[in-house]
């Protein structure tokens, strides 16, 4: 009689595999009701109270004066009221000892008037904000 240990190991291995498979499936099934419960949550609905867009038109132009920088942003107020805006410029190129952001706070643009922001470089990000309006984010070409 020649009996090997491999014949006894196969049923034991199969039993362990079935137990492991059962654990994996039970964990998967336990998560399905939790995922469905989150779908009906009222907190996941989109909000309808978005702020109005800033009544500004923008135009980038190349600067001709070396002291003004390579690009100039012109912002025109298209509303009938004066706008008090703040601007944050995230510089694409900066010296490592300086900050990467430049801020201009509380500038008033009268109706129909143009405000220019100079000393901009390619790929700078300009964010214009005003109370009651959604921020306007522009990238220098």
Image (tube, grey):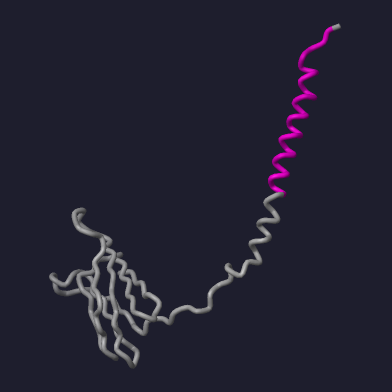
Instruction: Answer with the quarter of the image where residue 3 lies.
Output: top right
Task: Tell me the quadrant of the picture where the C terminus can be found.
Answer: bottom left
Q: Give the number of callouts.
A: 0
Q: Relative to 110, does residue 59 appear above or below in the rendering?
A: above
Q: Position of residue 50 (x, y in %)?
A: 47, 78
Residue 36 lies in the magenta stretch? no
Residue 12 lies in the magenta stretch? yes
**Residue found at the very far bottom of the displayed protein:** 80
**x 39%, y 81%: residue:** 132
Main SS class of the magenta portion in the image? helix
Q: Position of residue 85 (x, y in %)?
A: 29, 79
Q: Nearer the viewer, residue 122 or 21?
A: 21
- The magenta stretch spans which residues? 2-29
Task: Tell me the quadrant of the picture where the N terminus can be found.
Answer: top right
Q: Nearer the viewer, residue 139 or 108?
A: 108
**x 29%, y 89%: residue:** 82
Q: Relative to 81, does residue 116 appear above or below in the rendering?
A: above
Instruction: Answer with the quarter of the image where residue 45 lies.
Output: bottom right
**x 35%, y 80%: residue:** 131
Instruction: Answer with the quarter of the image where residue 2 lies.
Output: top right
In screen coordinates, is 42 left or right of 76?
Answer: right
Q: Position of residue 63 (x, y in %)?
A: 19, 74
């Amino acid at each position: 009689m020649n009996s090997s240990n491999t014949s006894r190991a196969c049923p034991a291995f199969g039993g362990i595999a079935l137990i492991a498979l059962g654990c994996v499936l039970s964990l998967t099934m336990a998560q399905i009701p939790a995922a469905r419960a989150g779908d009906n949550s009222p907190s996941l609905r989109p909000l309808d109270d978005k702020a109005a867009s800033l009544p500004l038109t923008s135009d980038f132009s190349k600067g001709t004066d070396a002291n003004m920088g390579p690009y100039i942003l012109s912002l025109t107020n298209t509303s009938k009221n004066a706008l008090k805006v703040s601007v944050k410029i995230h510089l694409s190129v900066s010296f490592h000892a300086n900050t990467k952001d430049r801020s201009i706070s509380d500038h008033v643009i009268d109706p129909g008037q143009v405000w220019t922001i100079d000393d901009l470089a390619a790929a700078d990000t300009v964010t214009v904000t005003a109370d009651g309006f959604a921020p306007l984010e522009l990238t220098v070409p």
